[in-house]
């Protein structure tokens, strides 16, 4: 029996558009399978919700424009060809238009919890990296966590985002998570792949160490370090029952992802980032993914949007093909 899940959003989903080569499953692309709605019967093979927010980037003194990221990611994903038929739901967008990031986080959390409780993998399209805390609020309140599941958070990022600022921003989400977990009598299982030493002060490294954060620097994530990356990723997957994968597109080299607030001088190769995403998706565990920091105003030839969409595509097609019961 299917169950209806109401997903609270500020803006209803719009119909996806893309190339059409003909009828039948042999010609399927994402825009053919995504239903634009605010709720309905689940589970789905994929669910999407957008987070239109620049407020965290503004507070963090970054280059604004990420609020337009969700629409650009949808546009880049829509024409991608599918290897097999699946079902997908776009629930619409949560929007932070009035500077009230905290309220936006709460609304995003409600939407994520509803989608995750439907039994579907959830893709949150950001938005600045402040999106990660709103995503976490939804995971925290989901049935899987309330029943005693262990949360594991993996951040693909050049930055720890553990700043201790007066107000929440795109630089604070994982410290906010750590404090929230402490309030609930738990220690945050937080891991970072791709962290860049020049982009993080010694204070941030000390904060990470004090919180027990496992991390793999960008200098150890090259194509010659596949074994180390695989071991790091496998340990992450094994450490949790519910997985939160947060993808800050500035983890990629600037040539691949120029359209971000802080382009990476070094970065982690796209092949490595995609490999990590595929391994996490294939785990079959309850999964929530957020994609952050796409700024269309700074992009070149839609490179960053296409890179982000490619990662989402790989995650969801890998998940759909994985053996075992759906999350």
Image: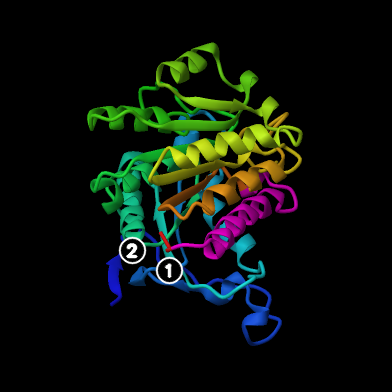
Please name the residue shown 69% across and 25% down the image.
219
Q: Is residue 50 above or below residue 221?
A: below
Q: Quadrant of residue 224?
A: top right
Whether residue 204 is visible here, answered yes or no, is yes
Answer above or below: position of 220 versus 226: above
Q: Callout 1: helix, strand or loop?
A: loop
Q: CA distance from mark 1 to mark 2?
A: 8 Å
Q: How many marks?
A: 2
Residue 56: within the magenta?
Answer: no
Side of 113 where 77 appears, left or right = right
Residue 73 image offset from top left, x and y in percent? 58, 56
Horizontally, residue 56 falls left or right of residue 198, namely left
The numbered disc on residue 118 is: 2
Tag 2, which secondary structure? loop
Crowding around mark 1 (Cα neighbors within 10 Å: few <14, some 14 to 19, many 20+) is: many
- Image quadrant containing the C terminus: bottom left
| The residue stretch that appears in magenta | 296-324
Q: Position of residue 70 (x, y in %)?
A: 52, 55
Image position, residue 108 (x, y; %) = 35, 50
- Residue 129 visible, this orientation: no
Q: Are marks 1 and 2 in contact (CB under 8 Å)?
A: yes
Which residue is under mark 1?
44
Mark number displayed over residue 253: none
Please identify the quarter of the rendering in which residue 276 is found: top right
Q: State the residue in front, 114 or 191.
A: 191
Question: Does the magenta portion include 321?
Answer: yes
245, 22: nearer the viewer? 245
- The mark that comes first in sequence, 1 or 2, is 1
Q: Position of residue 283 (x, y in %)?
A: 50, 51
| In the rendered image, the vertical position of residue 167 relative to residue 325, given as above or below | above
| Residue at position x 42%, y 68% in the image | 44
């Amino acid at each position: 029996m299917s169950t209806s899940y109401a997903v609270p959003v500020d803006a209803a989903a719009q119909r996806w558009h893309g190339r059409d080569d003909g009828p039948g499953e042999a010609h399927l692309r994402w825009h053919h399978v995504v239903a634009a709605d605010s709720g309905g019967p689940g589970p789905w093979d994929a669910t999407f919700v957008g987070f239109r927010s620049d407020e965290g980037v503004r507070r963090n003194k970054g280059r604004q424009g990420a609020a337009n990221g969700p629409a650009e990611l949808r546009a880049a994903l829509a024409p991608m060809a599918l290897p097999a038929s699946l079902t997908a739901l776009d629930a619409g967008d949560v929007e932070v238009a009035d500077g009230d990031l905290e309220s936006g986080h709460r609304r995003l959390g409600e939407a994520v919890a509803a989608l995750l409780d439907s039994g579907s993998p959830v893709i949150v399209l950001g938005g600045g990296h402040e999106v990660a805390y709103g995503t976490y609020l939804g995971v925290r309140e989901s049935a899987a966590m309330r029943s005693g599941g262990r949360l594991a958070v993996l951040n693909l990022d050049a930055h720890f985002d553990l700043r201790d600022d007066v107000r929440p921003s795109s630089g604070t989400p994982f410290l906010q998570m750590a404090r929230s977990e402490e309030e609930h009598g738990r220690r945050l299982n937080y891991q970072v792949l791709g962290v860049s030493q020049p982009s993080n002060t010694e204070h941030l490294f000390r904060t990470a160490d004090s919180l027990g954060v496992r991390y793999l620097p960008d200098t150890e994530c090259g194509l010659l370090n596949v074994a180390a990356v695989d071991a790091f990723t496998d340990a992450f997957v094994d450490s949790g029952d519910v997985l939160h994968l947060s993808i800050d597109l500035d983890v990629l080299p600037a040539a691949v992802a120029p359209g971000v607030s802080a382009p990476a001088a070094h970065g982690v190769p796209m092949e490595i980032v995609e490999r990590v995403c595929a391994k996490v998706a294939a785990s079959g565990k309850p999964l929530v993914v957020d994609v952050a920091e796409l700024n269309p105003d700074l992009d070149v030839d839609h490179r960053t949007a296409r890179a982000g969409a490619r990662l989402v595509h790989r995650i969801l097609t890998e998940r759909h093909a994985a053996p075992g019961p759906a999350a």
